[in-house]
Image: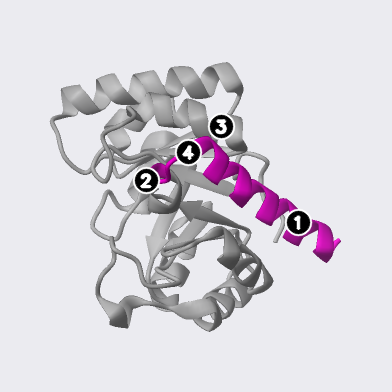
Amino acid sequence: MEASPSIGRLHVLTDFHLQQRYSHAALARLVIRGGADTIQFRQKTGGLHNLLVEARKVQAVCRDTSVPLIVDDHLPIAQAVGAAGVHLGQEDFPIAAARDVLGPEVLIGASANTRAQAEAAYEAGADYIGYGPIYPTTSKAYIKSVQGPQGLADVCEALPLPVIAIGGITHGRVRPVLEAGAYGVAVLSAICTAADPERATARFRAAIDGALLQEA
């Protein structure tokens, strides 16, 4: 699936819940050095003022390195910091309404756990789908929600837009998800909780580049 250059292959979600060694901005700096081509600012708790302060710091890192920033959940924060995009869950701001607010140039990603959700997001105007969890993961503990590579393949075949696989993705699972049709992967704990996030990112980058080279 071809995609806008703004939709990277390796999305790294920053975190200050599973780890507290690094700030969001420090993590962004490390993983960009390791080869991340999209940063997703993800913080589920805290007031809007704190979120805005942290997101601005991450945006400064992304701007300096020409890497797009996508803000998870919070459309006003994405607007306020001038992010490249926003990623919306099933219970977040409706995609069509978000498009009305943000205009055509801002990326809108949508989380989906079923083919029906993914198709609805496409119809509503999403630019890409974050689909998963593909594998079991600590952040998505409900085992029946796990889609597996075949569920991923079904969605990738059905939709004419990029699908980013998420959930339990390790560098060893990159090739299977790309072979299933995913445009790229989104990673949280395997990078943010690693002893060396920059090195962990580099392993993902090498796995992606190796898989794409084999496809060429």
Cα separation, mark 4 vs mark 2, equals: 8 Å
Please report the residue visible at 58 percent of the width from the left and 78 percent of the height from the top. 153
Q: Position of residue 156 (x, y in %)?
A: 59, 72
Q: Position of residue 213 (x, y in %)?
A: 82, 57
Q: Position of residue 26 (x, y in %)?
A: 41, 25
Please report the residue visible at 45 percent of the width from the left and 17 percent of the height from the top. 60
The answer to which image quadrant residue 142 occupies is bottom left
Q: Which residue is mark 1?
A: 210
Q: Which residue is mark 2?
A: 193
Marks 3,4: beta carbons within 8 A: no
Q: Position of residue 74 (x, y in %)?
A: 28, 39
Cα separation, mark 1 vs mark 2, equals: 24 Å
Which numbered mark, 1 or 4, is in the foreground of this view? Answer: 4
Secondary structure of residue under mark 4 = loop
Report the amino acid beneath label 2. Thr
Res 68 visible: no
Give the magenta range: 192-216
Precedes in sequence: disc 3 or disc 4: 3
Precedes in sequence: disc 1 or disc 4: 4
Q: Which residue is mark 4?
A: 196
Taking 49 as reference, is 191 above or below it? Answer: below
Q: Which residue is mark 3?
A: 32
Main secondary-structure element of the magenta-colored stretch? helix
Badge 1: residue crowd in 10 Å (few <14, some 14–19, many ≥20):
few
Badge 4: residue crowd in 10 Å (few <14, some 14–19, many ≥20):
few
**How did the renderer colour the structure?**
one colour
